[in-house]
Structures are given as structure tokens and as C-alpha cells.
Image (cartoon, rainbow, N blue to C red):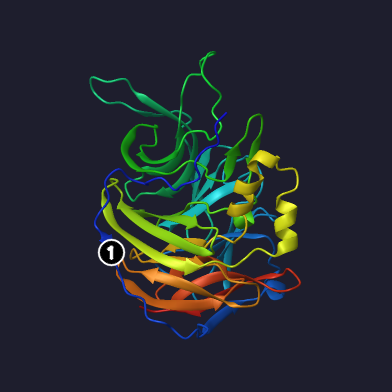
Amino acid sequence: MAIIRLTTVALLAVIAPMATVSLQAQVPVAAKALLRIDAEAENLSAISTLAVSPSGILAVYLRQDGVIRLYSPAGKLLASAGHTGEGPGEFRQLDAIGWLGDTLWASDGRLRRLTRYTADGKFLRAIQLPDRIEQVVPGAASTRYTGARLQAVYPDGSLLLQVMQFRVPRSNAPKEVMGDPRYAVRSSLEGAVRFLVATDPPNLCKFAGPEIIISMPGSSCPMTLRATPPNASRRVAVLQETSPGGSGLIRVVAVNDRGEPLFEHKRSVPLRPVPSEAHDRQLEGVPNDMREQVAARTRFFPPAFEVQVAPGGAAWIGLDAASGKLREWFRLDANGRQLPSVWLPASAKGLAFDRRGAWAITEAEDGSQSIVLYEARP
């Protein structure tokens, strides 16, 4: 089997003219911490996701406890929503939470269910998510999708889903190694596709060898990062490229909720080398005929760490940073113009935004997790 080329493929067949922005060196200055929801005081653990309502209520999904906590804009506990189970208002494992106005929604991938709660945690209703996603084009064969994961809920109730194209297997067909690209589609609650919003590259972290498939470690795999704002008005993808020489490139591509291109932006970034001992461990078990290619791709950490999109459409791209250092959050406004970068601790992740700045999950050396609001204005 031929080795698959490890090059980034285009997110869209047609994209807007690339935005070229000259970068000025910025002196790293840590953003001011405005509020802190303390791990010990609030008994926080295994924080999975944050989401902020338009009125500033912060929803915090605690995966281990199986509950969503709701905090006021001042960081005071207001209520809890849901708990582990299968009954009304309960969930098994959430893969996304968000807000429609002051209604909280939670997507349970295991139960294939979308549950809605009031801003004070009361159960409203549960909706079964569609199992069959299908796009019907008049005069042509329909296209079916599978493996749906909910990304966002639109104000009209339609869904932004990440899916794979469904294909009927053929006995004489060659074995697929990479799998299909993943698609972002806007679908009705019944599973009818309205728009194909974007086409993402396949997983570039897998190598096809003569007999085996090797998955590269996540710490050194330049995967595509994706995000959508709470109002689902756009989708932003960050495609990453690395070179054996230590230079990296991120491509930021934004499309609207109909899949129409908004902007593309490129930025070159230096890469941080993977420590030699860790790099050697990554090569254990790699066949000799693939060793050189795998070694080149795992020599440096990927350039980008996380991407988030604020309600107004601004994209925040967290660049790679060593533990204990400040991480640069490179920002682009809704039109692709560069905003001043924001510098947060390297442990800050899972950002969610309100008018004052960004809430972030932070982790101490002992592994405890707190939630901090950092000041950040355009």
C-alpha cells in the first residue's frame, strides 16, 4: 500500500482572497485576572467545557461529577443542571454544551439526545438527535452521512453537525486507511441537510504502511482545529503545517453558516522541538521503511494549541507554549483583520467569552482545576 502524502489539503474548493497582515513584535504581558472560581472552594474536578450565555451566566460541565454548574457573571454558584442517568433531564456523556439566548442546551452523544434547560437549571425538554443525516438533491442520488457529532445549535433550531460520508462497502474495494474527510453540515432536527458548510481534511496523523496503520502521538500531530461561535454564524478552521527545519505555518479559514468563504489568513510560527527522549519513544515500533518519515513529522510540537470563536466572530488561536510560560493567543476580528494578541498562562484552555474577556480552565501543578476570567478587550 502506498504511503499517504502528508500535506494539508484545502478546506474549501474556493476561498476568499487571502488576508496578508504584517506582524509587529509584541512584548508578552500577562492578561489581568478579573475573577477566579477556585478549585478547592467550589470542589471542581474534571472540567470539560465552558459556555457563556448572552446575559453572562457561565455553564461549567464537570465530566466526572456528571453535572452542569451555573455561575453568575460575578462567579457565584446559581444552580446545577442535569445529572448522570437516562431519564428526562439526565445524560450519560455530553460532547457539547451551549446557549440559545438564556436557554442552555446539552448534547449527549451516547443517548443521541439534545436536552434544554432554563438559566436556573430547570429541565425544559429533550429532543432525539437524528441518526440518519441525508442530503437530497433533485434529479440526483441522495448523499448520506454518518458518525454525527453536534457542534452548535442555530437560533432557528437547526443543527451544525460534524459528519462522515456514508458509503456502502464493496467486497472488491481496497481498504480505506485514512477514512473519509469529515464534513460540517447544517441539518434540520429530522436529519435533512440544508447546507454543506465545510469539508475538512482527513486525519493527517495516520501513516499507511504495507500492513499496518500508525497513528502519530497527539502531542506532535498537526491536526486541524475547528471552532464555531455560540450563535453558529460562522465556522473557523485552523490548518497546521510543519517542516523538518523547525518552521510552522497556520492557515485560518472562516466560512459562514452557508459555507460561503469569509476570509483566509496565514501566519508563520517557530516550532518547539520535542525532547530527544520523548522523540525516541515515539519511534518505538515504527517499521524501518517508515521511520524517516515519522521521525520528521514528530520532531516538533504542532504550532497551534486551541482555537475558539467569540460571539462577535473574532477568532482566538492559542499558539504552542511550554509549561509554565505565557501562551500567545493570536486574534483575528470577524473580517480577518489582526487584533492585539492576548497572553495567558500556558495551562489556560477551553476559553469562553463575555463582554469583559475570556473565561478559561486553568490547572495547577497538583492537577487541580480552577476557572479564571481574564481581561481581554479589542
Please give the name of the residue rendered at 43% of the width and 83% of the height, measured from the top-left corner: 26
Q: Position of residue 29 (x, y in %)?
A: 50, 86
Q: Which of these two is toward me, 233 or 256? A: 256
Q: Position of residue 315 (x, y in %)?
A: 39, 64
User: Furthest residue to the top?
Assistant: 171
Please give the name of the residue rendered at 62% of the width and 46% of the height, measured from the top-left corner: 93
* Quarter of the figure that contains the C terminus: bottom left
Q: Which of these two is toward me, 177 or 68? A: 177
- For disc 1, the neighbor class at 10 Å (few under 14, some 14 to 19, many from 20) is some
Residue 165, above or below 141: below
* Quarter of the figure that contains the N terminus: top right
Q: In terms of image quadrants, where is residue 45?
A: bottom right
Residue 152 shows in the view? yes
Residue 194 lies left or right of residue 191; in this view the side is: left
Residue 72 shows in the view? no
Residue 192, above or below 220: above
Instruction: Say how many tags the image has.
Output: 1
Report the residue marked by disc 1. 19
Q: Which of these two is toward me, 213 or 123? A: 213
Q: Position of residue 122 (x, y in %)?
A: 53, 55
Residue 239, above or below 21: above
Q: In terms of image quadrants, where is residue 323?
A: bottom right
Q: Position of residue 199 (x, y in %)?
A: 38, 42
Residue 196 lies left or right of residue 120; in this view the side is: left
Residue 126, above or below 376: above
Please give the name of the residue rendered at 76% of the width and 72% of the height, measured from the top-left corner: 366
Mark 1 secondary-structure assignment: strand
Which amino acid is tagged 1?
Ala
